Image: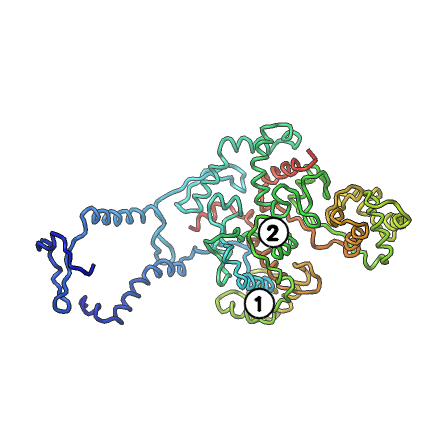
């Protein structure tokens, strides 16, 4: 093909530019789909429960990801401050994932279990009442807005299409029982989504208001689940280093 | 750009054109890249090939070129509990392990940790060198993990998080007890008395509790409250003790001193306000809101021990 033909035919040039530029992306991204060892083999990682899932939606709605990453990198300073570095396995059911490289606030990948529910409620309502130097905005409406959970089954159904093992059929449910155990498999059953959500919110009462299911319930349930699924005491540290 | 200022070489015709002519008269000078630049470029190409050999690089089918680079690190094997020297192919996770191993093995830190690990609390407190170590490491640990609730200096928040700088401890202030609190976490609980006590009885109990610490003068009301507190009607003494000094196995507060952990009594001006704030807690109880998280698993045993000493030193318990 002659140079002149490419330079005088803008449609052809556009196609060729796209082809050249896409090489970089294809080389970096596509192999991750075929490489077997991208995701570490660990026990305990499960998809979010319906309540946690709604909390995650609110997390995204409020733009928490703009200031908080959920990715602890394998550096000593991060290890000391936040805990074990994040594994690929831990965000395998996240769509979209909440990694990031912009931290105005601290990383939240292992915030689960670090503070009490009450602390989270207070901190979200008025951050400076517990951390005086904080610049986080107040989110008081989470505590006063009832959680809209009418769409939770649809949301799970959508995630199921992307490969998250929420179950619709008996067969899928049985597979989940085998994979995650009966208690978790029940939580992943789309047919019971609303009941499960209400039960978890009422039993655990994350927001401290009995009998009312607020957005705060979902948010705190989600935050308390972050980074708690893998029991790192069960694994030799050298094991994770073999995956990179 | 638009004017026709050509440099001397171009004017004299020393620079050749590429040979194309566009639109009849549009030509392009052929100025080759400087030699030094070109050789640097070839250099980077050679470097990239070396790079592929040393570091992980190209994907190949279901795996990738892993490179010949190696990282050595030392680690304590979880099963045998022995220090092991290991080798892993070059990657950032192995580098972190090498970094952590080096830090853990820095002679000074290792020596101090080994000393602290086997020392009893009494020995640590009596040894100024160990205490210096505890303060420097403890400050960082406390800031990262405890300060969000208890405040940077451990002053706490009345009604929510206990003050760690006074000598009033809900769950016991000995270092062993603080250690236990850190390891297992705590769940504070007080039953609600709304259904058990009538409004005027609530009033009497509040008056009695205030009288215990001198916030109110003894009165007939406080005498009636005492009967409820010490009798089967209220049964408050089960947890707070017959002397009302608290029972640390229950996390029950000492009611006879001026330190308030839940009801913010000192902030209220009048006796009526003090009673009112106290009554809300007696009526509704304390449930699901006073949680200390468990730190075992998140922090290692050494860190928890250092923190226990650090927190103990924060308080009046020194």
Picture disc at residue A128: 2
**At x 27% / y 72%, what residue is drawn?**
A11
Subunit that carries the residue with mark 2:
A
Q: Name the residue under label 1.
A: A173
Q: Based on the displayed image, in which of its 4 quarters is residue A203 positioned?
A: bottom right
Instruction: Give residue A170's position: percent from left, percent from top.
Output: 58, 70
Q: Is residue A2 above or below residue B248?
A: below
In the image, farthest residue toward the right:
B220
Disc 2 crowd, CA 10 A, few/some/many (<14, 14-19, 20+): some
Local secondary structure at mark 2: helix
Residue at 43% from the left image edge and 43% from the top image edge: B95
Looking at the image, residue B119 sits to the left or right of residue B244; the answer is: left
Q: Position of residue B266 (x, y in %)?
A: 75, 46
Instruction: Compare residues A138 and A160 and report the one nearer the observer.
Output: A138
Which structural element holds mark 1?
helix
Mark 1 or mark 2, whichever is nearer to me: 2
- Say above or below: B160 vs B110: below
Asked whether residue B12 appears in the rendered view, the answer is: yes
Q: How far apart are marks 1 and 2 (CA)?
A: 45 Å
> Residue B250 in the image: x percent, y percent?
76, 46
**Residue positioned 8% across, 54% down in the render:** B12
Q: From the viewer's perspective, is B127 left or right of B36?
A: right
Q: Camera-side residue: B148 or B60?
A: B148
Q: In this view, does A139 lie to the left or right of B22?
A: right
Say yes or no: labels 1 and 2 on the same chain.
yes
Q: Nearer the viewer, residue B219 or A209?
A: B219
* Badge 1 or badge 2: first in the primary sequence: 2
């Amino acid at each position: 093909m002659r140079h002149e033909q490419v330079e005088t035919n803008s449609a052809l040039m556009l196609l060729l530019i796209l082809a050249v530029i896409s090489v970089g992306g294809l080389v970096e991204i596509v192999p991750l789909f075929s490489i077997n060892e991208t995701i570490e083999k660990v026990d305990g990682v499960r998809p979010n429960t319906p309540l946690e899932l709604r909390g995650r939606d609110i997390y995204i709605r409020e733009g928490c990801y703009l200031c908080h990453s959920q990715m602890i990198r394998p550096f000593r300073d991060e290890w000391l401050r936040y805990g074990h570095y994040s594994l690929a396995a831990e965000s395998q059911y996240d769509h979209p994932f909440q990694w990031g490289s912009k931290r105005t606030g601290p990383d939240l990948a292992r915030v689960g279990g670090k503070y009490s529910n009450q602390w989270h409620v207070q901190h979200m309502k008025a951050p400076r009442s517990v951390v005086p130097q904080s610049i986080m905005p107040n989110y008081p409406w989470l505590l006063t807005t009832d959680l809209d959970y009418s769409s939770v089954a649809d949301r799970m159904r959508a995630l199921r299409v992307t490969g998250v093992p929420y179950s619709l059929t008996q067969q899928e449910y049985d597979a989940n029982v085998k994979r995650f155990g009966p208690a978790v498999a029940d939580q992943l059953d789309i047919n019971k989504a609303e009941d499960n959500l209400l039960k978890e919110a009422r039993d655990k009462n994350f927001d401290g208001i009995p009998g009312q299911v607020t957005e705060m319930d979902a948010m705190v349930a989600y935050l308390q689940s972050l980074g708690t699924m893998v029991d790192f005491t069960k694994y030799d540290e050298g094991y994770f280093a073999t995956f990179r | 750009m638009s004017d026709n200022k050509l440099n001397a070489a171009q004017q004299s015709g020393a620079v050749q054109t590429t040979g194309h002519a566009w639109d009849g008269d549009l030509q392009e000078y052929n100025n080759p890249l400087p030699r030094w630049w070109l050789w640097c470029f070839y250099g980077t190409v050679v470097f990239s090939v070396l790079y592929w050999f040393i570091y992980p690089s190209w994907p190949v089918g279901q795996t990738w070129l892993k490179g010949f680079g190696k990282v050595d690190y030392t680690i304590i094997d979880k099963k045998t509990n022995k220090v092991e020297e290991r080798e892993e192919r070059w990657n950032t996770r192995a580098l972190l392990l090498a970094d952590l191993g080096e830090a853990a093995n820095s002679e000074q830190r290792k020596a101090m940790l080994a000393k602290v690990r086997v020392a009893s609390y009494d020995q640590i407190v009596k040894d100024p060198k160990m205490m210096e170590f505890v303060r420097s490491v403890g400050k960082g640990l406390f800031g990262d993990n405890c300060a969000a609730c208890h405040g940077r200096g451990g002053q706490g928040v009345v009604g929510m998080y206990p003050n760690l700088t006074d000598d009033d401890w809900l769950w016991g202030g000995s270092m062993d007890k603080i250690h236990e609190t850190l390891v297992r976490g705590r769940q504070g609980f007080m039953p609600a008395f709304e259904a058990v006590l009538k409004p005027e009885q609530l009033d009497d109990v509040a008056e009695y509790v205030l009288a215990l610490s001198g916030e109110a003068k003894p009165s007939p009301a406080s005498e009636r409250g005492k009967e409820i507190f010490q009798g089967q009607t209220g049964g408050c003494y089960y947890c707070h003790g017959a002397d009302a000094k608290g029972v640390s196995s229950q996390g029950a507060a000492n009611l006879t001193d001026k330190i308030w952990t839940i009801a913010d009594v000192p902030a209220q001006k009048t006796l009526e306000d003090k009673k009112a704030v106290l009554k809300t807690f007696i009526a509704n109880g304390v449930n699901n809101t006073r949680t200390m998280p468990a730190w075992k698993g998140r922090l290692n045993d050494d860190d928890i021990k250092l923190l226990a000493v650090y927190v103990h030193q924060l308080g009046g318990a020194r």
